[in-house]
Image (cartoon, rainbow, N blue to C red):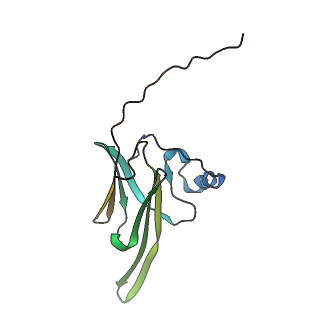
């Protein structure tokens, strides 16, 4: 579920804009997977009762050892490392890799009030977003030269 949230805007490099062409996530979506950083984490996000909730699908990881959540300058980054060995009928198969996802936090998000939990392969990140007054609109007069 994608939301229409105001996001904190930050200057982006030309390289970031070019990476959008390859990732399929243009800058206006607020999704920044990171060029060359790993596989994309599948997630959903929503604002509910003054909280920005992000649910990321990361099965097969130990959240205490394999998952890092960082926040800086209005950006939330989730990074996971997975290394899994499966044995079936005498064969073993490894599944491993780095998974990463960076999102713009909604305007007014409290970067100091973030909680995370992990249950059955789903990581939930909860960011407090204080209630904001509705944006006001005003018409700006245009002066003409005489």
Work out which residue is located at the far top of the displayed protein and give it: 146
Tally of numbered tags? 0
Residue at (60% x, 54% y) in the render: 16
Residue 49 percent coordinates (x, y): 28, 42
Residue 138 percent coordinates (x, y): 48, 21
Q: Which residue is nearer to you in this view: 38 or 139? A: 139
Work out which residue is located at the far bottom of the displayed protein and give it: 90
Work out which residue is located at the far front of the displayed protein and give it: 112
Residue 40 percent coordinates (x, y): 47, 61
Residue at (36% x, 90% y) in the render: 90
Residue at (45% x, 40% y) in the render: 6
Q: Is residue 55 visible?
A: yes
Q: Which residue is nearer to you in this view: 141 or 66? A: 141
Question: From what the image shows, is residue 82 above or below residue 79?
Answer: below
Residue 2 percent coordinates (x, y): 41, 46
Question: From what the image shows, is residue 102 above or below residue 80?
Answer: above
Q: Is residue 53 left or right of residue 20?
A: left
**What is the quadrant of the C terminus in the image?**
top right
Q: Is residue 62 visible?
A: no
Residue at (49% x, 44% y) in the render: 8
Q: Which residue is nearer to you in this view: 42 or 114? A: 114
Question: From what the image shows, is residue 17 above or below residue 120?
Answer: above
């Amino acid at each position: 579920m994608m939301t229409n949230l105001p996001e904190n805007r930050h200057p982006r490099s030309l390289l970031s804009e070019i990476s959008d062409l390859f990732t399929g996530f243009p800058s206006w979506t607020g999704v920044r997977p990171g060029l060359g950083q790993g596989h994309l984490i599948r997630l959903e996000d929503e604002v509910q009762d003054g909280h920005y909730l992000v649910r990321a699908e990361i099965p097969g990881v130990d959240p205490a050892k394999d998952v890092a959540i960082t926040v800086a300058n209005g950006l939330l980054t989730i990074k996971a490392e997975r290394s899994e060995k499966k044995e079936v009928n005498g064969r073993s198969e490894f599944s491993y890799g780095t998974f990463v996802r960076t999102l713009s936090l909604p305007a007014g998000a409290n970067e100091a009030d973030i909680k995370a939990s992990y249950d059955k392969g789903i990581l939930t990140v909860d960011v407090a977003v204080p209630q904001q007054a509705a944006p006001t609109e005003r018409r700006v007069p245009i002066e003409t030269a005489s």
